[in-house]
Amino acid sequence: MDIIKVIVTVLLVISSLLLVLSILLQKGKGGGISDMFGGGMSSAMRSSGVAARNLNRITIGIAITWGVCVILYGLIVKFQ
């Protein structure tokens, strides 16, 4: 059981770091206070490119992996 706990812990740390990096790579959606007055209309009309969509998919995959690792780690600690 200790080997599984170590593996899940390592996966949790790696997925946490990758999740932070992938979130920081995301393009910002809002422009702050200028959006309240209609300044962000042109940026909202643009379509996202292939790279942005792929980054979204990668981020979702990493987030799911992170969530599974958290649940597994909690179950391992509870039943140990």
Image (tube, rainbow, N blue to C red):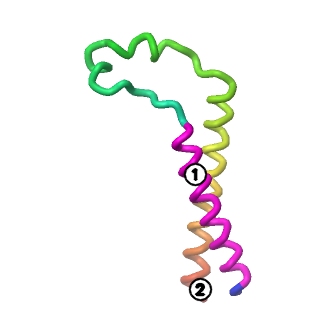
| On screen, residue 10 above or below 67 | below
Instruction: Please state if 16 lies on the left or on the right of 4 as rendered.
Output: left
Residue at point 69% right, 25% down? 50
Q: Quadrant of the C terminus?
A: bottom right
Is residue 8 found inside the magenta-colored segment of the image?
A: yes
Q: Earlier in the sequence, mark 1 or mark 2?
A: 1
* Viewer-proximal residue among 14 and 58: 14
Q: Marks 1 and 2, Cα distance to the nearest angstrom? A: 27 Å
| On screen, residue 50 above or below 80 | above
Q: Which residue is mark 2?
A: 79
Which range of residues does the magenta coloring cover? 3-25
Instruction: Please state if 63 lies on the left or on the right of 34 as rendered.
Output: right
Residue 62: x percent and y percent?
A: 64, 51
Q: Which residue is the extreme one toward the right?
A: 3
Is residue 7 found inside the magenta-colored segment of the image?
A: yes
Amino acid at pointer 2: Phe
Residue at point 58% right, 57% down? 17
- Residue 19 is tagged as 1
